[in-house]
Amino acid sequence: MNYVKDMREKLNIEYVKSELIKTAYGGKETFLASLHPRTLIIWYLFFGIVPWFIHNKIVLSCFLVLMVVLTIMARVSPLIIVILCAGLLGEIGFLLLVSLVFGGGLASLLPMFWLTVKLAVIALASIAVFTSMDPERFSDALLSFGVPGQASFSVSFGYRILPTLVEEFQRVFLSYRLRGKAPETHGIFYWRTASYYLKLLVLSFYPLILNSAKRSRTTVEALETKGFSYSFTNAEVKKMKLAHLTYTYKDPLFLIGTVAYISFAFWLGTFIS
Amino acid sequence: MSRSSLVQLSNVTFTYPGADRPVLKDINLTIYEGEFTAIIGGNGSGKSTLCKTFNGLIPQFYVGDFEGEVILDTMKTSDHSVAQLSRNVGYVYQDFENQLVRPTVMDDVSFVPLNYGLADYKERGEWALNITGLSALRNEFIWQLSGGQMHMLALAGALAMKPKLLIIDEPIAQLDPNHAKQVYDILKKLNEELGITIIVIEHHTEFIANYCKEVILMDQGELVWKKDVREALSQVVELVQRNIYPPQVTQAAYALLEKGHEDRILPIQMNEAITHFSPYSQRTETLPPFTTTSMAGKRELIRFHQMSLEYRTLKKERKQVLSNVNTSFYQDDLIALVGNNGAGKSSLLKLIAGIVKPSDGHVVVLGKETRKASPEVLSEAVSYIYQSPEEMFIDDSIRKDIEYYLRVRKIPDYELIVDKLLADFNLVDIQHQDGRLLSGGQQRRASLAIGAAMNPAIILLDEPTANLDVATKQQVIQMLGKLQNHVQTVIVATHDMQLVAEWANRIIVMNSGSILADGNRYDIFGDEDVMRKAGLVPPQILQLSRALCLAPPCFTIDEFTSRLDVVGAEGVQLELCKGYA
Amino acid sequence: MAKREVFQLTQSQKMMVFILSMSLYGLSNMFTELIPSLQLGPVELSVEYFAFIPLTLCILFHPLYAAIGASLGEIIFGELMLGQFGGIGEIEKFITFSLGMYIAGILVRNPLNRMQVGVAVMSGLIVHHLLGMIVDIGKVWVGVEELEAVKGLAESIIVIEGVAFLNDLLFSGILFALLPTLYLVPRLYGKIEPLLGMKPRNKDDRYTMKEIVTPRFVVIGIVLSAIAIIAEFLSETEFSFGEWEPDFMEMFGDWFIWIVIGVAAVIAVITIALMARKNRTQRSKLNNVA
């Protein structure tokens, strides 16, 4: 299912870019960000899975309220929220349309509405958690869960290399534009222009693949000279790498609070029905 | 000598997998503790490969045919892993950006000691940042750093282990003269105060003369010699044959030597040169009258009118890149834009190409307001050549790259145009190769040909001589001359003062986002205030001729040597100028 | 190292392929996430992915590392960094996409044979999209209460998913996977390998049994067990929620929910453990090779 689609062309591309950079690199000092990543992931494992199996409307509504509060607390970028909402509504609308064709009528709206609530709970839970956790922390969390060092390193390396790649891509893309020839007319629905840019987008990866190949050779070689492989032979190193992750009083507080809230929700759900 | 050896190579021969010829041939070499040694040699002479044997990258990482033995400290490199060997060896790559692997400065600098499990990794990181002057940036993301800062960080990362040996591949290739000096001052300090052995691969012989103690010459995989720096750089003929150019003062001194004295030790530093040339006398012939280039009556091609450029940072702060620029560029201008890293040179070029639009004011190129024209439209008149040629190679052979512009425009008989360009830029033999697989000089020539194929009125070049050895640089300067026939004006942003002095007819000095001075080479190089403020260092020969009070000063070695006469000959006795003695 | 009979890469070369695939596909994913889609009735013309990047790398180099690198790249760049990481939902995509790419990679023996490359690409895509469709339909089955009770809903979901499948395969699949791959593979073959310091794949090179069977076995095993789990839940939820719910809830209150939660948590832990073990298997395999 595509929760997240559309509406994007209406947004200014520069705004999008700056929002993304802010999302990815704007250090967060929110409550959720101050928790131990392991706490967050355990918390998320619950809200990422359990709502699928809950059909009690009261409980779901309570969950949704919690997620909305947490999302606000996590200061999620408004762009992401807009995209999410647009995606959810569009998806439902389209489903409704098709089921009308099959003679389902408005009756199918209600279950689909509750499915949407469910999806929203799950999506907001992951957004709240993972925007509070930059890839660097996520990588540490993976390491602390026992994922191999190379994999968790790759996550944080992706975080390092992205801006470099984007810049290089922009220059390569520009090379095509500066020497290329844009279509003279836009065509119906701008299809000429759109296909011109799409083609350039695909073509740009040819130089980019080769240039990156050259680069990754130095990177991997440099990792060797930086004692990277040595670090896996020593268990102490992993401990040192994770030493900055500490549990505080906030962690149990958060988990206990959540459990209390969930219990309340279920009590309320059974009480009302 | 009582010094103990740090690296010892005995009969080392190495062939890369799949290659038919060895890159290193039977090398015997000892590096002693405390050395500060430069390795010189043409492209492909095996300089980097040699350095990669020191920490075991060869033969451990590059599995090829390896013979001989390398001993680092007391360890035989073939018996230990690269990681073990690297504990005592720091390595800074030529493409240093790619060796920064962590997202933030602090993480990157302490990455190596952390990998080795040293509990004081943070202190070591702080120490290394302190030495390289990066402490204030410790929490920045890598991508927020400038090129020079990244290079310093790569150096700091290599230093954090306090290694015994530090290898740096082209430490100053992309730096302006001030930053270059800074880097070498740091290396000198490390060498003298901490006793770290330093090996640099370096093209800039003036820096070698000022900082290094010994020089290793490599040629086609063979180690020709290892000599004391003074002796090494005095081998002018031998070096020039291999396309390595000793400092300008040394070349000048060599050219003025009397026959039979060619084996003399020559001056290699400025102060030595001043003493050396003092006994010479100046020829009395009158010089041709100097004419200033007049800008009146020429066609205006580009105009900047009260133009400013700013962008917003991550923290939503406005950052002023250029402010209130007012200037025009005319037909037949050969313009050099000079100034420190970050002075706004590249931004100015991008504004002309329409890649960046002004935040305020106007940029008018051939009557078109760039704000309203897309880069595609402007590219009909303006061609912009990137600093890194690799980003201009968008097809799988340079022939196709050159014809791309013509082909998409369906220019009739474009093959003929391409053939001519290939011949002009000396690319015929390599026309079917991918640009990325060529040498630095070939890449540069190819990128110039790509630019020329667009048949532009205006051609813009960003650092066309960066990362090139002196011989290749000379070729590029020649090619710039050829370019002149194809276009109406050429604008070059550069740090290379030799290029500026020998090629430009108009120099624009930029300083923190505005134009500090605009004039010919006599105006600019003669204005010490401007030079100092913009952080520019004039070519050595110009400094020397000024120190010797030659008026007007000389810009090339030929000019200089033709103006001096042998010791004791008739003419005006040279005197040191005040302030230089 | 001695002369090799088969196409093998050193540990560091594998890491290069991994990083290359991860960063490039990740980058492309950021773009495709941001490209607006065009909806023409039921057919959505969207740029789903630039699958040609991992496909090309899988065909030219080591399929396993390129495939897993690409999937990880998508998660890091396309999801996590854009702040839209779907958490557990991504695991399914990770597995199906890696599997599809990997299959495409091992099917190619000679990178210069266009027919072979084309067939491999389409097979890989079919595997990926088909599995994706099954999982998507499964999700609605689990997520919607009394699905059968609402007339037309089940049919419409199947139709929608079916159309999406064909759309992905025929639009994105051909335009952004098949054609670019056919263009790139012959161009990069023999050129990109020296940049990474390795020899090109020879058409006579075969993967050893060890190399094919172990990782594929693991990946397929995970996929099958995932499908099995979904299928099991499908039947179970229909049964329990459809008929028993009111009574059940009254009798046992939230106890029942806690059981469900417990089961869900166990599944999550098992899945993660499997993923971790899969990675570890690779590592140890990789160490053996190096």
Image (cartoon, rainbow, N blue to C red):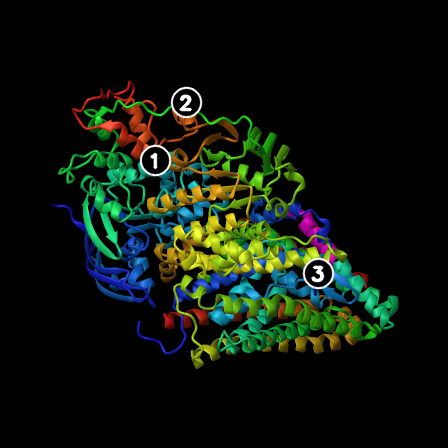
Residue C240 in the figure: left or right of residue B520: right
Q: Label 2's element?
A: helix
* Residue A123 percent across, percent down from the top left: 68, 58
> Which residue is label 3 attached to?
A3
Is the Cβ of the residue at disc 1 closer than 8 Å to that at disc 2?
no
- Residue at left 54%, top 32%? B330
> Which residue is label 1 attached to?
B181
Asked if the stretch drawn in magenta spans residue B489, the answer is no
Q: CA distance from mark 3 to mark 2?
A: 62 Å
Point out the frontmost of discs 3 and 2: 2
Whether residue A255 is visible here, answered yes or no, is: no
Label 2 Cα crowd, 10 Å radius (few <14 / some 14-19 / many 20+): few
Residue C6 in the figure: left or right of residue A32: left
Q: Is residue B296 above or below residue A36?
A: above
Q: Amino acid at mark 2?
A: Asp
> Which residue is label 2 attached to?
B529
Q: Amino acid at mark 1?
A: Lys
* Residue C32 percent across, percent down from the top left: 63, 59
Q: Please identify the dominant SS of the magenta region.
A: helix
Residue A89 in the figure: left or right of residue B537: right
- Residue at left 28%, top 42%? B245
Q: Are marks 1 and 2 on the same chain?
A: yes
When asked about the image quadrant of residue A272, the answer is bottom right
Label 3 Cα crowd, 10 Å radius (few <14 / some 14-19 / many 20+): many
Q: Is residue B154 above or below residue B318?
A: below
Marked residue nearer the N-terminal end (1 or 2): 1
- Most foreground residue, B224 or A233: B224
